[in-house]
Amino acid sequence: MKENSQSIYGCGIADFPKPEWGRFTQNKNKLYAHIYEPQAGSICLMNMDKKVKEARLLSDGSEVQIPPKEWNLTEYKVHSFLNLKHGFGSNYPLPDKIDTVVELTIT
């Protein structure tokens, strides 16, 4: 709770729909992706292509990759994708088994 309090206190309902892997909270231009379910590949941010300026893991401030679209993701032109670890699709296991939070700075 201490590591992720910024994603809860002062935040409200996000301007984006609930993703299949978790939930969003929002405070102005900060969108918090609460990832509950590990993904085998990249984490999809539906309809967010070119809307995310920067992403970081809230617990330690480390950068989260928003990679260029790989060959198998090019058909999803309106979506953006996250990789929590270096390398394509490296999201398993999640850094926090209960609630991995990624802070997204959005435009």
Image: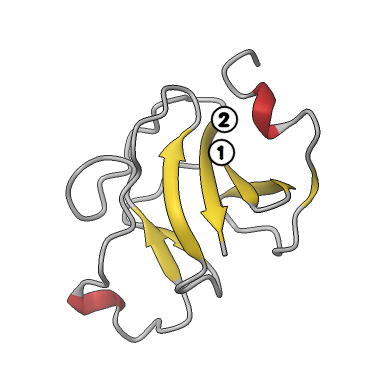
80 is higher (above) or lower (below) than 74: above
Determine the secondary structure under disc 1. Answer: loop
Q: Position of residue 65 (x, y in %)?
A: 31, 50
Crowding at label 1, few (<14), some or many (≥20) Cα neighbours within 10 Å? Answer: some
Nearest to the observer: residue 62 or residue 76: 62
Identity, as a three-letter code, of the amino acid under mark 2: Asp
In this rendering, the count of numbered labels is 2
Residue 36's tag is 1
Q: Position of residue 50 (x, y in %)?
A: 45, 73
Res. 95 image quadrant: top left
Q: Quadrant of the C terminus?
A: bottom right
Identity, as a three-letter code, of the amino acid under mark 1: Tyr
Q: Residue at x 40, y 84 (%)?
A: 77
Determine the secondary structure under disc 2. Answer: loop
Q: How is the image coloured?
A: secondary structure
Q: Residue furthest top?
A: 2
Res. 63 image quadrant: top left
Res. 16 image quadrant: bottom right
Residue 99's tag is 2
Q: Quadrant of the N terminus?
A: top right
First of labels 2, 1 by sequence position: 1
Q: Residue at x 42, y 39 (%)?
A: 56
Q: Position of residue 44 (x, y in %)?
A: 45, 62
Crowding at label 2, few (<14), some or many (≥20) Cα neighbours within 10 Å? Answer: some
50 is higher (above) or lower (below) than 92: below
- Asked if residue 36 lies left or right of residue 44, the reply is right
- Asked if the residue under mark 1 is in contact with the one under mark 2, i.e. CB atoms within 8 Å, the reply is yes
